[in-house]
Amino acid sequence: MTLLDALWSRGDEAPLRALVSDDFRYALSAGTRTMDLSAYLETVHGFRAAFSPIELLFHRVLCEGGRVAAHYSLLGEHSGPFYGTEPTGRVGSLEVMSVLHFEADRLVRQTSVTDFLTLRRRLAARDT
């Protein structure tokens, strides 16, 4: 999962770009609209701008045939605007489950399910 670590932790797109097919599609959750590579990278850069630095922690990775399922957390300090929430300086954690689909050694599709609700609640919580 070097490509996910490089992309999220360092902002390095090269490993991903080396593997994606020309018709790559990304969906943030099942049943939602899909994005092409450019829109996906824009989403990643927006998140990286709001949380810096980002540490990626893998919990479990499963492989079967042309599919890879990865459960991981993105940890970072909330240092930029995020969905209308001004920077709080708090450490935020986003839980993610991604399924990557490969055909002929090319990444053709990635679908991710994320726990934005818990992250947004943490950022909005009042310190007591």
Image: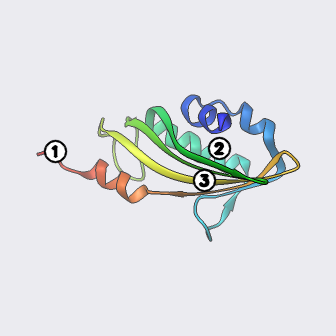
Q: Position of residue 103 (x, y in %)?
A: 84, 53
**Quarter the N terminus occupies:** top right
Q: Nearer the viewer, mark 3 or mark 2?
A: 3
Q: Earlier in the sequence, mark 2 or mark 1?
A: 2
Comes first in the chain, label 3 or label 1: 3
Secondary structure of the residue carrying numbered label 1? loop
Classed neighbour count for the residue bearing mark 2: other residues with Cα under 10 Å, few (<14), some (14–19), many (≥20): some
Residue topped by disc 1:
127
Measure the C-alpha gap from mark 3 to mark 1: 32 Å
Determine crowd level at label 1: few under 14, some 14-19, many 20+ residues with C-alpha closer than 10 A. few
Spatial CA distance of label 3 from label 2 is: 15 Å
Q: Which mark is residue 98?
A: 3
> Residue 9 appears at what percent x and percent y?
54, 31
Q: Closer to the camera: disc 3 or disc 1?
A: 3
Tell me which residue sits at (62%, 35%) in the image.
7
x and y, in percent, of residue 79 in the image: 38, 35
Q: Amino acid at mark 1?
A: Asp
Q: Nearer the viewer, residue 123 or 55?
A: 55
Q: Give the x, y percent position of residue 99.
A: 65, 55
Q: Residue at x 35, y 49 (%)?
A: 85
Element on which disc 3 rests? strand
Instruction: Please tell me how crowded label 3 is: few (under 14), some (14-19), or many (20+) other residues with Cα within 10 Å.
Output: some
- The answer to whether the residue labelled 3 contacts the one labelled 2, judged by CB atoms less than 8 Å apart, is no
| Kind of residue at badge 3 | Ser
In the image: residue 125, left or right of residue 92 = left
Mark 3 / mark 2, whichever is N-terminal: 2
Residue under pointer 2: 41
